[in-house]
Image (tube, grey):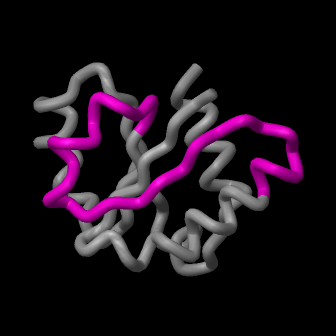
Amino acid sequence: MKKILLMCMGGFSTGILVEKMKAVAKEAGEEVEIDAISTSSLDAAAENYDCLLLAPQISYLAADIEKKYPDLPLYRIQPTDYGRLNGKKILHKALEIMK
């Protein structure tokens, strides 16, 4: 099972997106675990996931995260996809970066 982690400033704004992604995954028969956290929780969670998706409002953290966790694939969610809660597109991007 692939494990996807979404991160935003407080961990709350990604909650709806996580639910949409889970629904898309279930419909497609993808076995994934998807969770959301705040920026302050990354150190405790990073080693347990196969990829990290950053909410647009914290995309400025990408370079530091890539340095600290070079083996953790990272994707900056596009603002339009995030704003539209495009769970399908974001899930497919997560699966793509884990290959």
Q: Position of residue 5 (x, y in %)?
A: 43, 47
Tell me if residue 44 is in the magenta stretch.
yes
- At x 12%, y 31%, the residue is 68
Q: Position of residue 13 (x, y in %)?
A: 41, 78
Tell me if residue 8 is in the magenta stretch.
no
Up/down of 67 relative to 75, above or below: above
Residue 80: name its quadrant.
bottom right
- Which quarter shows the N terminus? top right
**Count of numbered circles in the view:** 0
- At x 52%, y 36%, the residue is 3
Up/down of 21 relative to 5, above or below: below
- At x 13%, y 30%, the residue is 67
Stretch in magenta: 24-51
Image-based side of 14 in relation to 33, left or right: left
Image-based side of 15 in relation to 13, left or right: right
- At x 42%, y 44%, the residue is 75
Residue 16: name its quadrant.
bottom right
Q: Position of residue 92 (x, y in %)?
A: 68, 44
Q: Position of residue 81 (x, y in %)?
A: 58, 68
Residue 93: name its quadrant.
top right
- Which quarter shows the C terminus? top right
